[in-house]
Image (cartoon, grey):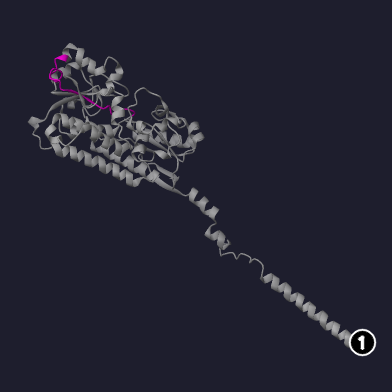
Amino acid sequence: MKAIFGVKLKKIIFIGILIIALIATSGCTGEPTPVEDEEGASPAEAAGTATGTDELTESAEITITDGFGRSVSIPEDIESVVCSGAGSLRYLVYLQAQDLVVGVDSLEKKEAEIEGRPYALANPQLKDYPLIGEFRGKDDPEKIIGISPQVVLKAGTTGQPPATSATEADTLQQKSGISVVSFPAGSLKNEEQKTEMYSSLRIMGEVTGKQERAEEIIAYIEATMDDLESRTADIPESERKAVYVGGVSSAGAHGIISTEPAYPPFLWVNANNVAVGMGTDHADIAKEALVDWDPEYIFVDIGTIQLGNEGAIGELKTDPSLKGLSAVKDGKVYGVIPYNFYNTNYESVLANAYFVGKVLYPDRFEDIDPEAKADEIYTFFVGKPVFSDLNGQYNNLGFKQILQ
């Protein structure tokens, strides 16, 4: 009996030991408990999960200095912008970044019989975007908030003090809660304004990730101006043609007395602008002054036809004092493409320069077909050869002799 009891006791002890061993073994085969690093985070958390990495990327920011010296924090990767002010959207198209646009101002949405902006002709889809406010930088913060772009690219108003432009950008940023990068539009009229223009293109390129394209644009402009200059630089002063451009558009169409004393195409081909003493900005001259100057050649900005009665062209045909001008009597009156339309269309300025050069100094431009050259320039800047479309809106008066 004792022997039997002893055997049973041994079995019970053995089974107990076996159960304990099984429990210990099952603990070792389960999922391991994450070990926290020294900062209290697990290795997976320290490395960042897929979701965590995306969130970090989306929230990453950089700080840039805009054209008015403002430090602005913007997302590192920009996917949506709106452009405010005259010229801003044009520069964005030059940069080939128009796909980032999510809203436009009232002028871009306006249906007009004549569309004088090559960038808009090349991108008709821009009219379909939501409205951000009125043109010339009169933004509606609530509409911008509703569209929710990552950045507003805002061109300062021409002739406005830099401090005013900076204040406007600060105000819009405060009201909308959206980063506003602002800059002067600049121009190609003189070195100071050209520096502003190039700086603004580079700032926009930095915001949109188009730095290389910004440098391409600047290099193209410089090379084009150098080509124009080199063709005519050695022409003696006594052989340089006396010229005038009239009917120049400025916030709308104008007549023959509307001119540009610093008209870039004349500067680049070394022609003598008879209005040069009137300053550097747009000017309205006295008709009597034009009669006294009596230029050998007259170029007419064909945007003038929007006035009715052919605008400046009609004046040259019918005004008794103007009909006596040498250029009119000799048939040396030519049409050039309008370039002032919601600020300057620089591609049209460059294209006009080749036509002007061809007219004044044909031997220096014998290799140039002005219309083909214009389409080359338009394609580089806005992506499409829009010369025919643009000229057609002005009765095909561009790049031709309009009085014979």
Front-most of 376 and 119? 376
Q: Which residues are magenta?
A: 323-342
Q: Which residue is mark 1?
A: 1
Front-most of 177 and 16? 16
Residue pictured at 69% horizontal, 73% vertical:
25
Vertical comparison of 147 with 303: above or below: below
Name the residue at the bottom extreme. 3
Write down the quadrant of residue 390 in the picture: top left
Across and down, in percent, residue 366 comes to 14, 35
How packed mark 1 is, by other alpha carbons closer than 10 Å (few <14, some 14-19, many 20 or more), is few
Front-most of 141 and 170? 141
Across and down, in percent, residue 313 comes to 23, 18
Front-most of 60 and 228? 228
Vertical comparison of 223 with 325: above or below: below
Across and down, in percent, residue 229 comes to 17, 38
Residue pictured at 14% horizontal, 15% vertical:
324
Residue pictured at 54% horizontal, 60% vertical:
46
Residue 121 is inside the magenta segment? no
In the picture, measured across the screen, residue 157 lies left or right of residue 234, that is right
Vertical comparison of 237 with 53: above or below: above
For the C terminus, the quadrant is top left
In the picture, measured across the screen, residue 143 lies left or right of residue 293, that is right
Q: What's the residue type where badge 1 is placed?
A: Met
Name the residue at the right extreme. 1
Q: Is residue 337 visible?
A: yes
For the N terminus, the quadrant is bottom right
Q: Is residue 340 visible?
A: no
Vertical comparison of 127 with 320: above or below: below
Query: Dot 1 lies on which element?
Result: loop
Residue 331 is inside the magenta segment? yes
